[in-house]
Image: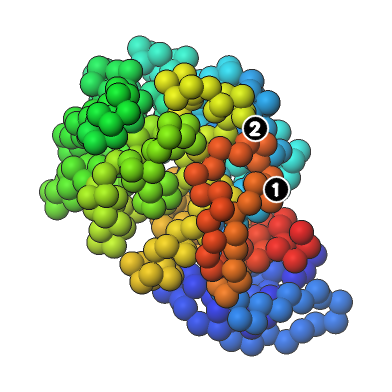
Amino acid sequence: MKLLIKNGRLIDPAGALDRRMDILIENGKFKEIAASIKKASGCPVLDARDMVIAPGFIDMHVHLREPGQENKESIESGSRAAAHGGFTSLACMANTEPVNDNRSVTEFIIARARQVGLVNIFPVAAVSRGMLGENLVEMADLVEGGAVAFSDDGHCVMKADLIRKALEYVKMLNVPIIEHPEDHSISAEGQVNEGFISYKYGLRGMLNAAEEVIVARDLILQGRIQSRLHLTHISTAGSVELIRNARKLKTPVSSDATPHHLLLNEEMVKEYGTVYKVKPPLRTEADRLELIRGLQDGTIDCIASDHAPHTRDDKDKEFEFAPFGVIGLETSFPVTHDRLVRTKLLTLNRLVELFSTNPARVLGLKTRGRVKPGFPADLTILNLKKRFKIEERDFRSKANNCPFLGWEGQGAVEHTIVSGNVVYSLKAR
Ligand SMILES: [Zn+2]
């Protein structure tokens, strides 16, 4: 089992590499990385001339819906969507049915992912039993079972004392808490950002403060406990500022932003289009620009999709009754590359950090996010000259609730390689 990839431009920020390199893969692992590797007889060669090779992309915030809601998505359809989007690994959230709050669910997800055998799936377990915010799960047992992080995502851990205990516990286990920062008593029944759009359409609003009071609370606790805290789908300028200040005070914290919060604002919520109904809500243009500054100055570490598949029937409901969420696995790279890198807001190297190097570090995946001999051979190969158009018929996801449908631009995933196996190719489509 060998594969030789020749003539590509390898960008590996963890190894401070950005140059033309050949890569030899053997038995699912990187064997050799060198300026020129001779072709051996019988070894298949993938010519990556004019392509960019990145360590495999990792989406650290995905809802796969299995077990329990396989009509929305499954481990298999989600894996296909990930491979199509260039993701070799993903972390899946715990709000399945039943909730992933015990080892049997974690082990089921891992076993099912292995059967499907396309991308690496790392389960995130719930912080609290049943995600009810009352009692901690059996954290040590879940980590032993394969959970890489804990999150009640979908809900915030509202009790300060519970998140304090959780942070203290994961410090010993050396895994992160992924917080969905939302004070539910403030956001309440909110539908959209509080401001222009909520007034215009008479929809209930969600204040920036709903997010920021939890970001502030968690940062205060984390400043004392010095554990591992990751704040997910940051959406407001105030949150960016709080994280930036906490970093100056040497509080260990990481965070991510989603492509939809980076590229869309509340004004997109036109005509009650439920595809723009997300949590946290699309915010103002000023918030959006501050998120981009957060990516530029290193305050925000990762881009994560918050891939949240829903059926057409669910999203066709009236705005107030439709569920929150958009899909993102298949569009994250092309839209962010086109609108953030081609516009020179971010460098390509920085985008690779945001999609691979940093999520690997945050999740503690020591052998991912880096191209190094002996590590699993996960690669995302990009064709930056290729034009794309986001179209529903290309989706591998079961869902179509995508706010980028019809978007055109430049830069596509050419191949996705997991443990040396090509799990997606643009040309084979
Ligand atoms: Zn969330």
Choose top left, top right, bottom left or bottom right for residue 103: top right
Using the rendered image of the protein, determine whether residue 141 is visible from the camera's viewpoint.
no
Which amino acid does the dot numbered 2 rest on? Glu
Identity of the residue drawn at 41% across and 58% down: 354
Instruction: Point out the image quarter for the N terminus.
Output: bottom right
Which amino acid does the dot numbered 1 rest on? Arg
Q: Residues within 10 Å of mark 2 (few under 14, many from 20)?
A: many
Identity of the residue drawn at 14% across and 52% down: 248
Alpha carbons under labels 2 and 1: distance apart = 16 Å
As drawn, the label of residue 393 is: 1
> Which color scheme did the rendering employ for the protein?
rainbow
As drawn, the label of residue 97 is: none
- Mark earlier in primary sequence (2, 1): 2
Foreground residue among 85 and 401: 401
Image location of residue 317, percent across then percent down: 53, 22
Q: Is residue 241 left or right of residue 137?
A: left
Q: Secondary structure at mark 2?
A: loop
Task: Point out the frontmost of discs 2 and 1.
Answer: 1
As drawn, the label of residue 73 is: 2
Identity of the residue drawn at 71% across and 57% down: 424
Judge: label 2 CB < 8 Å from ligand 1.
no
Q: Against 167, is 288 above or below?
A: below
Q: Determine contact: label 2, label 1, CB under 8 Å.
A: no
Image location of residue 29, percent across then percent down: 66, 62
Identity of the residue drawn at 33% across and 67% down: 345
Q: Against 267, is 142 above or below?
A: above
